[in-house]
Image (cartoon, grey):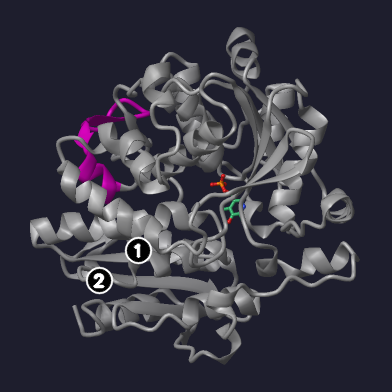
Amino acid sequence: MRYISTRGQAPALNFEDVLLAGLASDGGLYVPENLPRFTQEEIASWAGLPYHELAFRVMRPFVTGSIPDADFKKILEETYGVFAHSAVAPLRQLNGNEWVLELFHGPTLAFKDFALQLLGRLLDYVLEKRGERVVIMGATSGDTGSAAIEGCRRCENVDIFILHPHNRVSEVQRRQMTTILGENIHNIAVEGNFDDCQEMVKDSFADQGFLKGTRLVAVNSINWARIMAQIVYYFHASLQLGGPARSVAFSVPTGNFGDIFAGYLARNMGLPISQLIVATNRNDILHRFMSGNQYAKETLHPTLSPSMDIMVSSNFERLLFDMHGRNGATIAELMASFKKGGGFSVEQDRWSETRKLFDSLAVDDAATCETIAEVYKECGELLDPHTAIGVKAARECRRSLSVPMVILGTAHPVKFPEAVEKANIGQAPALPPHLADLFEREERCTVLANDLKAVQGFVTAHGNRGKPL
Ligand SMILES: *Cc1c(COP(=O)(O)O)cnc(C)c1O
C-alpha cells in the first residue's frame, strides 16, 4: 500500500514511513493511494469473529508490504487483549433501535486507546526491525497524553515526553499519566497553559537540533495509523446489528474529524452506512461547514467536553481532498487561503454531495447536561459529556427510525465528573476495577518553567531510556 499527500507535492510513502512521518513535507496529510474495497459476501463472512481477528481482516490491506501477516496478527491480539471487556467494543442499547458503542474499556477509559495501543506496538515493531530509536513529544489537555503513554509503556525503542499544563488537568487525567512508571516515560508539567505546551512541541518539531540526530515522532490525531485503527469498530458495530445486509447510521462526537473520518472510510470500503452525524460542542467549525458551507475559524470556548475544544479540525483536510476529486493543488490553495485568515466555502454541488451522507449538530453545555440526565432517567446509563453530545445529535438529526443508530461512546463518565455533577442526577461515576486504586498509586512528573530551552534540555538529558541522548 502506498500513501499520498493531500497537497500533492510530497513523495508517496509506504506504511512504515507513514507511521513515522506525521505531516507530509508539503504540509498535507497522508491518505491511502487506493482504498481497499470489500464485497458484501466478504464482510458478511466476518460475523462473529473476535475483535482482533476482525481488525486483522479490515486493516491488512493497509500494512501489506510492511508487516507480515503472522506478525500483524500477533500485534493485534496483544493490542486488544488488554481491554477490560471481552467484546472489546460492546454495544449497549439505550432506546428503540438506538445503541451506544462503548469504546471506553481500554486502559485509559477513552476511545483513543483503540488507536494508541496499536500505534505504540507498531512503532516498536518497525523500529526494532530497523534498529532505530525515536523520541515522541506530545502536548495534552488530558485524554491523548494518557492514551499515548499507556500505548508506549512497553516500547523498547521509544522514549515519550508528554507536556501538560501544570495544575490545569483534572486529577483523574493527571494520575492516568503520572502513575505509569517506566524509564522511557516522561511527564512534564509546564508552568503555562495548553497552548504554551502545544507551541513548544511545534517548535521542537520545526527545529530538531537538540535531539542530536534522534528522530522525533508525533502521535497526534493526524497520524494515519490512528485513523486506520478506528475504521475497525464501525465494521464491528455493523456486524452486531445485522450488517452488511442492513445499513447502519452513526453519530460521532468529534473535534478534529478523526473518528468520524474513519467511519467515512469504512463506508467507502464497502460497509453500508446510510448516515454519519457530526456531533460537536460549542466549538462548532464542523457544524458550521455541514449546515451552512462555511469553514472559518472562531475563538475557542472552553466547555464541559474539553476533548472536543478545538478551533480548526485537523483531519477535515482529508475529507476536502476527496470532495475535490483528490486534487492536491486545489487543497493546497484552499488551505493557504484559510491560513491567511480567510474562511472558505466549497462549490455548491460538492457540498450537496457531502450532505447526502453527513448531518451535524452543535450541542452546548446546558443541552449536554440535560441529555446526561434524560438518558439516566430513561435507562440508568451514565454518559460522559462527549457521548451525551453524540446522543443529542443522534436524536435531533436521525433520518430513519428503522435504521439502527449507533452513537460512539468515546469516554467513561468517570473521566469527566464535572459534567456528570452538573447534570444533577445524584449519581457519581465510579472508577472501574482496574483503576480502583488510581488515587493511591505513586506519581512521577517533572515541573518545568514555561521555557522552550528548559523543556528541550530535559528531553536531551533523558531521551535514551532516562539517560542523555
Ligand atoms: C479525542 C476525543 C474526542 C474527539 O475525537 P476526534 O479525533 O476529534 O474525532 C471525543 N471524545 C473524547 C472523549 C475524546 O477523547
Residue drawn 53% across the image and 54% down it: 111
Residue at 41%, 73% in the rendered image? 452
Quarter of the C terminus within the rendering: bottom left
Which is nearer the N-term, disc 1 or disc 2?
Answer: 1
Q: Is mark 1 within 8 Å of ligand 1?
A: no
Kindly state the secondary structure of the residue where label 1 is placed.
helix
Q: Write down the region rendered in magenta.
A: 1-21
Instruction: Give residue 77's position: percent from left, percent from top.
Output: 31, 54
- Residue hosting label 1: 204
The relative height of residue 247 versus residue 187 in the rendered view (above or below) is above
Residue 183 among those drawn in magenta: no
The residue tagged 2 is 210
Residue 320 x %, y % = 50, 25
| Residue nearest the viewer, comparing 453 with 76 | 76
Residue name at image x 48 percent, y 57 percent: 86
In the displayed image of the protein, which residue is found farthest to the front?
A: 48
- The answer to whether 24 appears left or right of 194 in the picture is left
Give the amino acid at mark 2: Phe
- Do callouts 1 and 2 mark residues in contact (Cβ within 8 Å)? yes
Q: Secondary structure at mark 2?
A: helix
Q: Nearer the viewer, residue 107 or 15?
A: 107
Q: Amino acid at mark 1?
A: Ser
239 left or right, relative to 289 = left
